[in-house]
Amino acid sequence: MDVHYLVRRHIQPPLQLPPLQLLPLRRRCRGGGVTLSVACCSTAASDHQERPWESYDRDIQSHASSDLARSLHLLADMQAAGMRASAAAYARLIRALARAGRALEAEALLLEMRHQGIHPDSAHYNALLEGLLARARLRLADRLLLQMADDGVPRNRRTYMLLLDAYARAGRLEDSWWVLGEMKRRGIRLDTAGYTTLVRLYRDNGMWKKATDLVMEMQEVGVRLDGKIYNGLIDTFGKYGQLADARKVFEKMRAEGIKPDIATWNALIRWHCRVGNMKRALRYFAAMQEEGMYPDPKIFITIISRLGEQGKWDELKRLFDKMRKRGFKDSGAVYAVLVDIYGQYGHFHDAHECVAALKAENLQLTPSIFCVLANAYAQQGLCEQTVSVLQLMEAEGIEPNLVMLNLLINAFSTAGRHLEALAVFQHIKDSGMSPDVVTYTTLMKAFMRVKRFEKVSEVYNEMERAGCTPDRKAREMLHDATVTMEQMGCY
């Protein structure tokens, strides 16, 4: 079988995005004039009932995030009636199109605004930038920033915060420092959200001690510590094995009257599971439910895999029964399916059966649920089932994102199928997405498993050239690969 068969068959061909100078779509409007629009003709065009401008504009904005097609139809009808949408309506549409991966149409709206004499401002560029960054299309985002400068539109706090968050998530340390430097040069002070991102940056780059210094800095400048900051600190201490400090931060958080959210509990449970302290992890899991918190399916994988490794299937059954009794029906359904994937009962080895079982429970299938299922299969090295989850996700109208594709690389890596993992990696780049630290590190793991040590250093070097800062795991794999090659007499 061709090693790229699964990838070519089950993943849609990448969207070929041209440069940002686009030709707008044209259509004839009433009266013989020409107007610009990215929307197709509305089925309501034959409706001669006149609507006021406020009604059109209000409905376009209100439906942009929930029913984008309807908003675009309303825009076409509005233009056919000789009216123009407001700048706020355009901003909503541009953001919604970009978030949906429809960058071409989003930019066409920017061009349409210019032709109608509406000068796009920072809000419109930020709306498109937010969508591109959310889809990990960093190269297009860089091109948009250049276009923004050419149009004389200044970057504001929102622009820099979007960039800082995206660069931190992608592991681009140098780019993150550049953004922080630009903010300082322009006199833009970090707010609580900015400090939260900075804590995450320190966490992901092994600088956990600096995170504690950051708290003192925040207190000095009068920035309030909120739940996200505390969550970031707990996660940072947990990741580097400082669980006693993590618990102290948790107690301080509660003492100051800040209620722990799902992210707080997840961090405490995950890192205690990681060190094998299941007794305390399950205590936190029970406390979360006692406070009425809806259990996050993502944390189930950690609990199930740890207890499964220890053969404590009776404990898993008791957890499942307790969730049912507490009324967490949806979480209980996901939990039961994940237990089956991990092999205790063997009922749902097929991804289609898993999804069908969840639908039978009337559970709404969200991107998060699909990610949980894909991760469960990936950790078991069940590649075909991981691909099936992606297929089912697309069938539900949800486009796979970088997180899902990283999970697919991990599935192939765990199964020792490095060529398929490499094919998915190439697909990510061909799709216009920018691989992040997780992408590169997972691909390095794939080559380590098949003893292709020379490829490990190649991926590491490419990661650095792409602007991603290697994490501790990547550095350790590079060291191990280098030592092994030297012992083999390869340099």
Image (cartoon, rainbow, N blue to C red):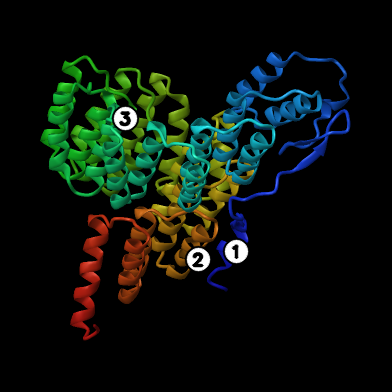
Quadrant of res 259: top left
Position of residue 184 in the picture relative to residue 372 (left or right)? left
Q: Which mark is residue 423?
A: 2
- Kind of residue sitting beneath label 2: Ala
In this view, the residue in front, 290 or 477, is 477
Q: Which residue is mark 1?
A: 8
Q: Which mark is residue 193?
A: 3
Discs 2, 1 touching: Cβ within 8 Å? yes
Query: Residue 42 location, x and y as percent?
Result: 80, 30
In this view, the residue in front, 133 or 230, is 133
- Kind of residue sitting beneath label 3: Ala
Is residue 369 at all visible to an observer of this figure? no
Quarter of the image with the C terminus in it: bottom left
Q: Secondary structure at mark 3?
A: helix
Is residue 10 at all visible to an observer of this figure? yes
Which residue is found at the position 50% from the left and 57% from the top?
428
Of callouts 3 and 2, the N-terminal one:
3
